[in-house]
Image: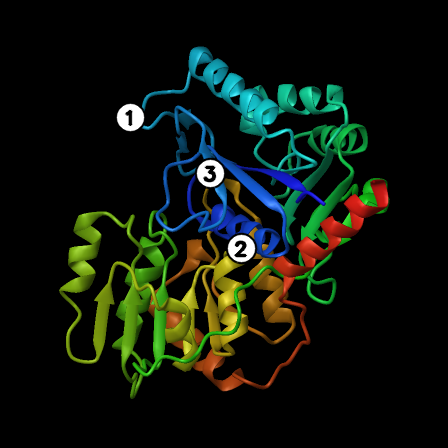
Amino acid sequence: MTSPRVLFYVQHLLGIGHIARASLVASALAEDGFEVTMVTGGLPVPGFPGPGINHVRLMPEVTSREGFSGLQDIDGATLGPEGERQRMEQLLAVLGDTKPDIVITEAFPFGRRQMRFELLPFLDAIMTMRPRPLLFASIRDILQVNKKPGRDEETVALVRQHFHRVLVHGDRNLTRIEDTFPLAGEIADKVLYTGLVAPAAPVPSLEKYRVVVSAGGGAVGQKLLSAAVAARDLISAPGRWCVITGPNLDAASFDSLASKGGGEMDVFRFRSDFRQLLGSAELSISQAGYNTVCDVLRAGCGSLLVPFAAGGETEQTARAVKLRELGLAEFIEEAAITPDLVASGIGKALAQRGKAHLDLNMDGARETARLLRREINRES
């Protein structure tokens, strides 16, 4: 029996969260015997999608400004009609070459509306294929709230017309799709929950820090980092701290933070053993992105969250609020952050550490593989 072929479309824009989560899913599929091709459209990210995955990069590669309002090519120029046409043609060529049994679109149609110029023709092409691949949407547990009229209705129409199932990478004990997608009832028959997509629990690092401060890729974490470092001077017996700025923090901000390091506070741009450091830490101070929160929950350390909220973003705030309601984290709104609030939040997060417990399914990557195999066996 031949291995089922999977074509997995992933467009990361500002950070690496989308491609990191998708890469965990792709690796689990490959381990389960699927032949996986991942097609990506963002800037290259070392280490992703990982070994054993066929990888096609769309050209020109694109990135986005902080508010996700515009697409640019790798040189910073606006992606115009010609660039859109080139990407669309390349994506359709990959579809024709791979002849997949399963197609997965990461985020779309619940997100990545900027990419409709290539994804709508892509969906139409899938409809004409014989045999027709099973089409799945792969989405995180909490969605960005659409404020423009008609957006949710458009999403529902696309799901009902084109998609076999919607894979929600979350645990219903924590969040449900209807919490952030008001028309979820209209697609309830298509929704499958996989559990949270998280790596295995880390082996705690022998290098121990009491507090680990991190800001993801660093492109939008300067407020968090500065306030956290300043808060350290406001608490008694702060212990040893590790500050991880992310590779994209601007040089001046990094140099300013690094000048405050030394002694009991170490400042790094990147640590490949981030998850292991969390495993031996008492507290994490971070944004509230999907992958970081999964890492913190796996590690079992205390958590103080400062959700990214610029440009109308709601997803991280919704996650932070939910975790605080369950007693799993404290949080501070990004716009209101001050060293005093961080110092107070540190005390509260340390005091509640270990008091709350929620049994969560965090093996979402392997569960996705199981569900896809079940669905394709049913349709064969």
From the image, state whether disc 3 or disc 2 is nearer to you.
3
Callouts 3 and 2 close, C-beta under 8 Å: no
Label 3 Cα neighbours within 10 Å, binned few <14 / some 14-19 / many ≥20 = some
Alpha-carbon span between mark 3 and mark 2 = 14 Å
Q: Which quadrant, please, contains the N terminus? A: top right
Of helix, strand and loop, which one carries label 3? strand
Q: Which quadrant, please, contains the C terminus? A: top right
Task: Specify the color scheme.
Answer: rainbow
What residue type is disc 2 on? Answer: Leu
Q: Which residue is mark 3?
A: 55
Going from N to C along the chain, the mark reached first, 3 or 1, is 3
- Report the residue at 76% width, 28% height from top: 132
Of helix, strand and loop, which one carries label 1? loop
- Report the residue at 57% width, 43% height from top: 36
Give residue 75's mark.
1
Q: Residue 53: percent from the left, percent from the top? A: 50, 45
The number of numbered discs placed on residues in the rendered structure image is 3
What residue type is disc 3 on? Answer: His
Q: Residue 2: percent from the left, percent from the top? A: 68, 42
Find residue 210 and report its image quarter: bottom left
Q: Is residue 185 among the parts visible in the rendering?
A: no
Alpha-carbon span between mark 3 and mark 1 = 22 Å
What residue type is disc 1 on? Answer: Asp
Q: Which residue is mark 2?
A: 24
